[in-house]
């Protein structure tokens, strides 16, 4: 069952319903995983999505913050939603396709502005969240699974516009990269995007603060598509739809795509 999926931090699914629909119409992924929906589940604008063929949805939401959703043309069923680090946040949802593949959609905490858990509670929460992800993958080794989402970390030197300048900036600090790597190793997750595009600068996020984000190009690759080793060779066609960052009233993230022949 070949399918294409996309992951996108939409930064309010209700506010940005028009560009979600544009993506669904123009790109037509079989599955779209959204993060930072900022909406209770019952207020997600599902009718327009259903009219475009996305009749399936599993989601976790909360008013004004966080929130994750999986929209799909393919039948799926919810198989879990975990509150890592007991934050009480809607940051994870998992769904199983008819072929037994499980898709995990994550929104890892951003971590605030100061990379020191002693003075910044949010940074500590981020590290704790990643640690509990690691422990969960150690406890039950994932199989036939895909993990996507805004993981809020750019792990490689070429995942940021300037490695040296960002070493002390939240999202690229060594301690964050170490924690993300430990979670990835625990599940033996394969980075599908970098499997397909192994070399070169690659970004999925550009700050709203840049007057001309495209020309400045000070980006970071915060959004990821991983797969377990038993299905990683089926992944291909990875790309980042950079143009979506320039759409009307955009998210500061661009959608990341991958296809799987399973």
Image (cartoon, grey):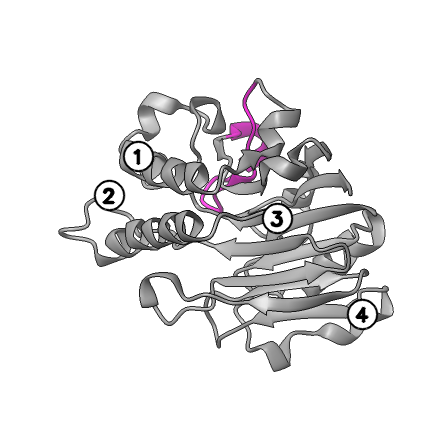
Q: Which residue is mark 1?
A: 173
Asked if the residue at tag 4 contacts the one at tag 3, i.e. Cβ–Cβ closer than 8 Å, the answer is no
Category of crowding for the residue at label 2, using alpha-carbon neighbours closer than 10 angstroms: few (below 14), some (14–19), many (at least 20)? many
Left or right for 86, reference 55? left
State the residue at coordinates (51%, 49%). Answer: 150
Name the secondary structure under disc 1: loop
The mark that comes first in sequence, 2 or 4, is 4
Q: Earlier in the sequence, mark 2 or mark 3?
A: 2
Rendered view: 82 above or below 24: below
Q: Quadrant of residue 178?
A: top left
Horizontal side of 120 relative to 225 (left or right) equals left
Residue annotated with mark 4? 55
How far apart are the alpha carbons under marks 2 and 4?
Answer: 41 Å
* Residue behind mark 3: 145
Quick one: which residue is furthest to the bottom in this view? 42
Tag 3: Cα neighbours inside 10 Å, few (<14), some, or many (≥20)? many
Q: Are marks 1 and 3 in contact (CB under 8 Å)?
A: no
**Residue 240, percent across and down?**
66, 36
Specify the label residue 59 is tagged with: none
Cα–Cα span, label 2 and label 3: 31 Å
Residue situated in front as seen by the camera: 200 or 99 = 99
Instruction: Give the alpha-carbon distance from disc 3 to disc 4, as whole Å.
Output: 22 Å
Q: Which tag is nearer the camera, tag 1 or tag 4?
A: 4
| Residue position marked by numbered label 2 in the rendering | 115
Secondary structure found at label 3? strand
* Residue 203 painted magenta: yes
Q: Earlier in the sequence, mark 1 or mark 2?
A: 2
Q: Residues within 10 Å of mark 1 (few under 14, many from 20)?
A: some
Q: Measuring 78% from the left and 50% from the top, which residue is drawn there? A: 29
| Residue extent of the magenta highlight | 200-217
- Cα distance between the residues tagged 1 and 2: 7 Å
Tell whether label 4 touches label 1 (CB within 8 Å): no
């Amino acid at each position: 069952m070949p399918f294409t999926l996309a992951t996108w931090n939409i930064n309010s699914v209700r506010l940005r319903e028009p560009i979600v629909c544009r993506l669904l119409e123009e790109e037509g992924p079989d599955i779209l995983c959204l993060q930072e929906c900022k909406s209770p589940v019952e207020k997600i604008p599902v009718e327009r999505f259903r009219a475009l063929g996305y009749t399936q949805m599993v989601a976790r939401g909360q008013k004004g913050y966080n929130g994750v959703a999986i929209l799909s043309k393919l039948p799926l069923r919810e198989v879990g939603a975990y509150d890592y680090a007991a934050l009480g946040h809607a940051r994870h949802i998992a769904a199983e396709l008819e072929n037994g593949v499980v898709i995990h959609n994550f929104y890892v905490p951003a971590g605030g502005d100061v990379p020191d858990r002693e003075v910044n509670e949010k940074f500590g929460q981020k590290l704790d969240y990643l640690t509990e992800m690691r422990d969960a993958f150690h406890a039950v080794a994932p199989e036939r699974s895909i993990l996507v989402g805004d993981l809020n970390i750019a792990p490689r030197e070429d995942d940021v516009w300037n490695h040296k300048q960002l070493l002390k900036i939240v999202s690229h600090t060594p301690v964050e990269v170490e924690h993300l790597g430990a979670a990835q190793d625990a599940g033996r997750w394969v980075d599908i995007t970098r499997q397909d595009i192994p070399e070169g600068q690659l970004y999925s996020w550009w700050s709203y603060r840049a007057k001309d984000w495209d020309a400045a190009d000070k980006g970071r690759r915060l959004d990821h598509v991983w797969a377990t080793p038993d299905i990683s060779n089926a992944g291909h066609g990875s790309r980042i739809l950079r143009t979506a960052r320039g759409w009307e009233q955009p998210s500061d993230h661009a959608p990341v795509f991958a296809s799987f022949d399973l």
